[in-house]
Amino acid sequence: VVLILDEATSALDAESEALVQEALNRCARERTVLIIAHRLSTIEKADQIAVINKGKLVQTGNHSQLMADVNGLYYSLVSKQILSSKIKGNTVEDLEQQP
């Protein structure tokens, strides 16, 4: 079974996203799941993340590996999303607690 999710939580608020993400995590156990997402908190716990820029694969790894590359696109995108959420009133701690 392969489960493909394309922006599955993009229209949800943070609380609803957390509930959906928790359900998806349960469903994803022992299955292959392909998640297409711009909201990077959605893919943070993925075994493998592929970063695609302008149609080209530019990075692969898990969240920790990609965040270790401070010059990488993934690090830049995560940092921008954290800053954007912080400006909107969320704290970094709020973001880190999201699944």
Image: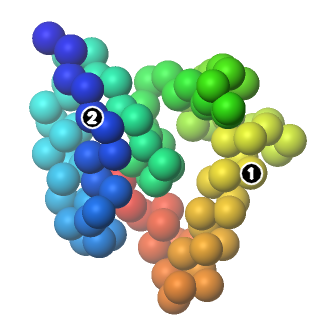
Q: Is residue 56 left or right of residue 9?
A: right
The structure residue drawn at horizontal position 38% and vertical position 61%, both measured from the top left corner, is: 98
Q: Label 1 sits on what residue type?
A: Ser
Q: For mark 2, does the 10 Å Cα neighbourhood hold few (<14), some (14 to 19), or many (20 or more) residues?
A: few
Residue 82 position within the rendered picture, expressed as x and y whole percent measured from the top left: 60, 67
Which one is closest to the eye, mark 1 or mark 2?
2
Task: Work out which residue is located at the far bottom of the displayed protein and give it.
Answer: 89
Q: Indicate the quadrant where residue 4 lies.
A: top left
* Quarter of the image with the N terminus in it: top left
Q: Given contact means CB atoms under 8 Å apart, are the residues at marks 1 and 2 in contact?
A: no
Helix, strand or loop at mark 2: strand
Q: Position of residue 37 (x, y in %)?
A: 43, 43
- Using the rendered image of the protein, determine whether residue 25 is visible from the camera's viewpoint: yes
Circle 1 residue: 76
Tell me if 95 is positioned left or right of 55 in this view.
Answer: left
Mark 2 — residue? 5
Q: Which mark is residue 12?
A: none
Residue at 29% over, 71% down: 13
Place of residue 95 in the rendered image (x, y in percent of width and height, measured from the top left) = 48, 66
Q: Residue at x 60, y 63 (%)?
A: 81
Spatial CA span between label 1 and label 2: 24 Å
Towards the viewer: 52 or 61: 52
Q: Is any part of residue 59 visible from this angle?
A: no
Mark 1: give few (<14), some (14-19) or many (20+) Cα within 10 Å. Answer: some
Image coordinates for residue 89, horizontal then vertical, percent: 51, 88
Amino acid type for the residue under numbered disc 2: Leu
Q: Secondary structure at mark 1?
A: helix
